[in-house]
Image (spheres, rainbow, N blue to C red):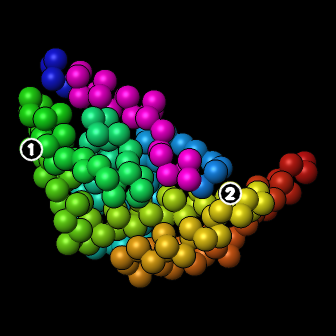
Amino acid sequence: MKALINLLFEARILKEIPRSGFHFLGSGGESVAEHAYMTTFIGCVLAHMQPDVDQLKLLQMCLIHDLSEARCGDLNYVQKKYVVADEGKAMADLTKNVPFGGIIEGLFEEFRAGETLEAQLAHDADQLSLVLELKALRDLGYDGPESWLPHVIARLKTRIGEDLARQVLKTASDAWWFEEKDCDKS
């Protein structure tokens, strides 16, 4: 039980670790845990759009894809030029005493390899999370996201991911609210 509780506390620390790329953007921000939530939610949407996918595997990959950052931190692209985080070792260490640690580690390695449909969709969910953040910031009038969006979109691996990204760019981030405000009339 102690290993499981330690794993839970380690996952919890992701709420306190900021995603570092937003510093370069000059606006926005989120914790690694907030990002993992959004990635997992997008993964859930993708799982329903792709009926032949192993939904549980996809959602688990989305949930744990950045778990190693509890030990390594969130290195941005500039930092990765100079610092190499051993995420595989971090994941092995944080799961070594957990009864199902091998499963978590296997999912993490499958995600990193990016060869299965589930891994590719989880990767796209990760990127689409950033696309949504950048689009919301752009809609608020920030200029930085405009130059970032093409690079993030170019990293998408699936047709579904590309289709969703195109629709995100066409949709105002507050459109859902304006469409729903007519419901207030009673």
Q: CA distance from mark 1 to mark 2?
A: 39 Å
Query: Which kind of residue does numbered mark 2 sit on?
Result: Leu
Task: Give the percent coordinates (x, y) of residue 164.
Answer: 52, 73
Q: Which span of residues is magenta-colored?
A: 5-24
Is residue 101 placed above or below 1 in the rendered structure?
Answer: below
Is label 1 in a helix, a strand or a loop?
Answer: helix
Badge 1 or badge 2: first in the primary sequence:
1
Could you tell me which residue is drawn at 18 percent across and 42 percent down? 91
Is label 2 in a helix, a strand or a loop?
Answer: helix
Task: Give the percent coordinates (x, y) of residue 4.
Answer: 19, 25
Q: Which residue is mark 1?
A: 102
Query: Which kind of residue does numbered mark 1 sit on?
Result: Gly
Q: Which residue is mark 2?
A: 137
Could you tell me which residue is drawn at 38 percent across and 44 percent down? 74
Q: Residues within 10 Å of mark 2 (few under 14, many from 20)?
A: some
Decide which of 122, 82 is in the foreground and name it: 82
Query: Given this view, does label 1 or label 2 mark the residue nearer the observer?
Result: 2
Could you tell me which residue is drawn at 86 percent across and 49 percent down? 184
CB atoms of marks 1 and 2 within 8 Å: no
